[in-house]
Image (spheres, rainbow, N blue to C red):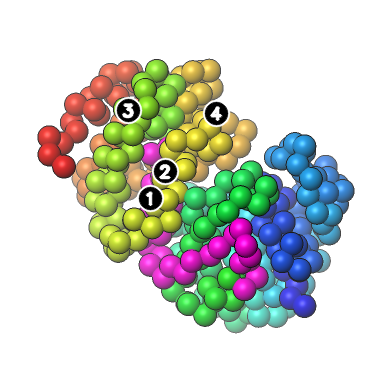
Amino acid sequence: MHKIVILGSGAMGTACAKIIKENGYEPLIYGINENELKDLENGKNEFYFPNVSLPFFKTTSSLEEAIKDADFIVISVPSAALNSLFPYVLEKLTKKVILINTCKGFWPQTTSTIHYKLKEISKNYKNVKDIVTLIGPSFAEEIVKNAITFVSGVSENLEAIQEVQKVFANTFFKILAQQDVTGAEIGSIYKNIIAIASGMLAGLGYNINTQAALITLSLREIRRFNKIAGGEEKTLFGLTCLGDLILTATSDKSRNYTFGKNYFLKNEKSSKKTVEGLASIKTIFEKYVLTNIVELPIVRTLYNILFLNKNPNECIKNLLKISPNKE
């Protein structure tokens, strides 16, 4: 039987482990939080999923033990940890492995997307068969309750995607193959940005009509940025962008949406949980907007509010004023 390792004992790591366990495998979860690991060994994860019964998992706090003889490694750690974690993982591989990435956004302190950076760093390691990134509308909280969920398995290598499909696919969790890596990652990055903007509208007291308009019009901006990045336009209308955008930009279960909402509603300027959209706003604005490569009004508006502390109501009003007169 395949040895399948989950790096990360958080929400998505736990959700992936549950799918794999219920598919008849015995995943090993690596983590650094001893309380979470103890919970997982006892069929729960109280921090992320209070009052939810889970399978009993095998866990370890030894990264070397986890990686040894692995066939599949699911990378489900905060993106900030990748710089230190990933090179160590590569050095310790003992056999050929498929890496399954659930991290989204840009690689820390760079303008490279996470999937491409993982590929770049691992290209000289013969034990890496390939990397598949899972992207799509998929709250971990829903996955652990066996809600029917469709995501994209993103890789240029169709055979690698198919191998991952065999491990994950069941009656409630489906992986669709997507080989346009650039378009998939752009959609995934941008939906977190729009989720923050949509949440801010809610926090400032705007109604759902305004949120729906913003989300719809944001597709113009996403298409513009995707064209610059080199992604295929049709990809934006699949699970990795439109599907994920609908979910993430409208739900209180979304970390990015909730951050935007509470930024004004509760005056919370930071979050204990990862808010991927924050770093993406800064990266895209500084690399593409500030240098006049492309104008992205939503990104500019959010940057002005979050990083320049400009008046949010004025910024939002100005954004809505520049909406196009024709569809």
Label 4 vs 1, first from the N-terminus: 1
Tag 4–tag 1 contact (CB < 8 Å) = no
Name the amino acid, label 1. Leu
Task: Please tell me which residue is depicted at 61% across the width and 50% down the height of the picture.
Answer: 147
Q: Earlier in the sequence, mark 3 or mark 2?
A: 3
Location of mark 1 (residue): 242
Q: CA distance from mark 4 to mark 2?
A: 24 Å
Residue placed under numbered mark 3 in the picture: 209
Q: Nearer the viewer, residue 58 or 50?
A: 50
The quarter in which the N terminus is drawn is bottom right
Callout 4 touching callout 2 (CB < 8 Å): no
Dot 3 alpha-carbon crowd within 10 angstroms: few under 14, some 14 to 19, many 20 or more: few
* Amino acid, disc 2: Ile
What residue lies at 62% left-to-right and 62% top-to-bottom? 171
Circles 3, 2 touching at the beta carbon (< 8 Å): no
Q: Say whether disc 4 or disc 2 marks the residue closer to the N-terminus.
A: 2
Query: What kind of element bears circle 3?
Result: helix
Front tag of 4 and 1: 1
Residue 79 picture location, percent across and down: 57, 50
The outermost residue toward the left is: 325
State the extent of the magenta-drawn residues as a range: 166-195
Residue at label 2?
Answer: 246
Q: CA distance from mark 3 to mark 1?
A: 18 Å
Q: Residue furthest front?
A: 171
Residue of label 4: 270
Q: Find out whether residue 301 is within the magenta segment.
A: no
Amino acid type, residue under disc 3 in the picture: Asn
Q: Looking at the image, which residue is at 64% across and 43% down? A: 141
The answer to whether residue 40 is visible is: no
